[in-house]
Image (cartoon, helix red, strand yellow):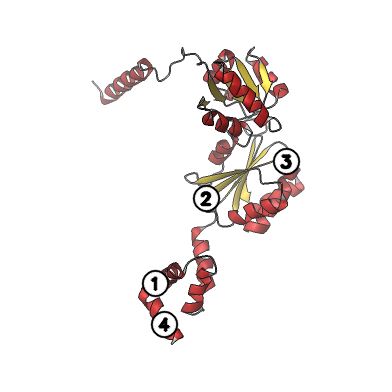
Amino acid sequence: MKETDRKEKKLSRTEDSVWDNGAFDTESSVRSGVLYLCATPIGNLEDITLRVVRTLKEVDLIAAEDTRNSRKLLNHFEIKTPMTSYHEYNKIEKARALIAKLREGKSLALITDAGTPGISDPGEELVRMCAEEGIEVTSLPGACACVTALTLSTLPTRRFCFEAFLPSDKKERQQVLEELKTETRTTILYEAPHRLVHTLGELLETLGERRVSVCRELTKKHETVRRTSLSEALAWYEAHEPKGECVIVLEGRSRAAMEQEERQEWEGIDIRAHVELYESRGMDHKEAMKQAAKDRGIPKRDVYAALLQEDS
C-alpha cells in the first residue's frame, strides 16, 4: 500500500471516530434552563452557523439587543421563536426577568445586533448574573468583528488587547489613551464612521506614529482594509468620508523604543538621582536600587556603596 493511501485511511478512521464519539452531534437539542449565547453575522448572513440556526429554532425565547433588526435575521432563516428585547437601558431589570424564566426551566438564546453576545454589549451583565445564580451558560461561537479584523491586519496576532469603543467621557478617554502609550500588544478598537477621523487624530497625537489597519464593512460587499500608518490613515479619511462600522487595529509600542526612552531618562544623571527617579514612581528604596543597578549593568552593592559615599 502506498504511503499516501495509508495516511488517507488513517485520517478516515480518525474522522469516523470523532463523529461516532459525538463531537459533531447535530441531533442534540437544547436543554431546559440554559442560556445560549448565539453569535450572529456581522454582515454576511452566510456566516451564521448551523448550530446557531438550530438553537434559535429550538429555544423557548430569544433575547435580542434590537428586535427590529433581529427580526430580519430570523425571517431569513424562517425562525419563528418568540423574541424579547434585552439592551443597555433595561439590562439589569430585564436580566432578572430572564433569569426567572430560566429558573422555570425555559431555554433562552441571547443575540446581539451583530457578532458574539457579551463582547462590547450588555450581554456580559446577563452572563455575570446567571453565573451568580448558578444558571448554566454556554456560548455558540461564530462571527466576531475584532478577531476578523485582527486576522486581516497583518499586525502581530500572538498578543493583542481589545479596547472596544473608547470612553465618551473626556477624562476617562484620555486616561485610556495614556495607558495605550506603553501597550506593547496589538490593540483593537471599534469606532463609528462619523467619529473615525477624530479618533485617528487623537491616537496620532497621543501615541505618535504607528502602523495601523482600518477595517470597514467587514464581510460585506464593500469590505475594505487599509493597511497604513496613523498619519496616512488620518489624511486619507479626512479626504474620503468613511462609511460603515470601522475596526481599528493598532500596532503595539516597540519594546526597543521603550527601552531607549527609559535609558535616555537616566543617562547623564548620577546614581542617587537614578534611584530617586524610581522612588518617585512608587518603588520602595530597595526595589529602586535594584532597578537602577539593573539599568546600569552593575551589582546592587555598587549602587549601595555609591549612595553611602554620597551621604558621607
For label 1, the crowd category at 10 Å Cα-Cα, with few meaning under 14, some 14 to 19 and many 20 or more, is few
According to the image, label 1 marks what residue?
Answer: 297
Q: CA distance from mark 3 to mark 4?
A: 60 Å
Precedes in sequence: disc 2 or disc 3? 2
According to the image, label 2 marks what residue?
Answer: 185
Position of residue 41 in the picture relative to residue 5 (left or right): right
Give, as a three-letter code, the residue at label 4.
Leu
Residue beneath the point at 65% across and 31% down: 92
Task: Write down the quadrant of residue 242 in the picture.
Answer: top right
According to the image, label 3 marks what residue?
Answer: 193
Question: Percent position (x, y) of residue 89?
Answer: 71, 32
Position of residue 13 in the picture relative to residue 245 (left or right): left
Circles 1, 3 touching at the beta carbon (< 8 Å): no
Question: Percent position (x, y) of residue 261?
Answer: 54, 67
According to the image, label 4 marks what residue?
Answer: 308
Q: CA distance from mark 1 to mark 3?
A: 49 Å
Q: Residue furthest bottom?
A: 312
Q: CA distance from mark 2 to mark 4?
A: 41 Å
Precedes in sequence: disc 2 or disc 1? 2
Asked whether the viewer can see residue 221, the reply is no
Q: CA distance from mark 2 to mark 1?
A: 27 Å
Foreground disc of the pair 2, 4: 4
Circles 2, 1 touching at the beta carbon (< 8 Å): no
Judging from the image, what secondary structure is the residue with disc 4 in? helix
Say which of 301 and 73 sits in front. 301
Give, as a three-letter code, the residue at label 2.
Arg
Position of residue 205 in the picture relative to residue 152 (left or right): right
Judging from the image, what secondary structure is the residue with disc 3 in? helix
Relative to 150, residue 27 above or below: above
Circles 3, 4 touching at the beta carbon (< 8 Å): no
Precedes in sequence: disc 1 or disc 3? 3
